[in-house]
Image: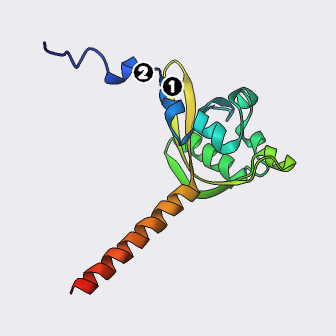
Amino acid sequence: MAHDFHSASPLSHFDSTELLDALSTGIVVLDAHLCVIYANVGTQDLLGFGLNQVRGRPIGDLFIDSNDLVDLLRRALTRGETFSMHELLLTPIAAIHGTRPPVVVDATVTRLEGQITGMHLLLELADAKLRRKRTRESELLSRVDGRRLMARQ
């Protein structure tokens, strides 16, 4: 039996929200006013926010000092380009009460423009500690491999 690969995407069997919630990377969708429309479970885990707490709120209001993040978002919105910032310090407002520590993230912002939905931003937040840990492990493995090679020679 032949499959018609053109009739449906293999992803059509999945709910998009379930796919986004399965990611460990934080995914936030913002409207043109920088208000949160959606935040996946990865974002909620990373920042300590529930979706119902943040939906409809300006993203800048969720952090103690959000100037760098808001500037990055505005730049992506006005220029229509994808922008990234490594090791961005975000201090969720919950940190004021001592319930949440600041986090260091790698942020990537992409402008999404739909004919019906209008202008939106997709914000990806990855825990920078994990990237640094992987980089250190990779460097360590490279050094060990280098020493093994030298020992063989």
- Relative to 104, say whether 138 is above or below: below
- Is 98 in front, or is 109? 98
Q: Which residue is mark 2?
A: 14
Tell me the residue at 54%/31% (across/down). 21
Circle 1: is it few (<14), some (14-19), or many (20+) Cα within 10 Å? Answer: few
Circle 1 — which element? helix
Q: Which residue is mark 1?
A: 18
Quadrant that contains the C terminus: bottom left
Amino acid at the residue labelled 2 = Phe
Q: Residue furthest left?
A: 1
Image quadrant where residue 49 sits? top right
Query: Residue 130 placed where, x, y %?
Result: 54, 56
- Is 106 in front, or is 103? 103
- Is 146 in front, or is 83? 146
Query: Residue 43 placed where, x, y %?
Result: 62, 39
Tell me the residue at 63%/32% (across/down). 32
Tell me the residue at 86%/47% (across/down). 97
Q: CA distance from mark 1 to mark 2?
A: 7 Å
Tell me the residue at 36%/76% (across/down). 144
- Relative to 79, say whether 3 is above or below: above
Numbered label tally: 2
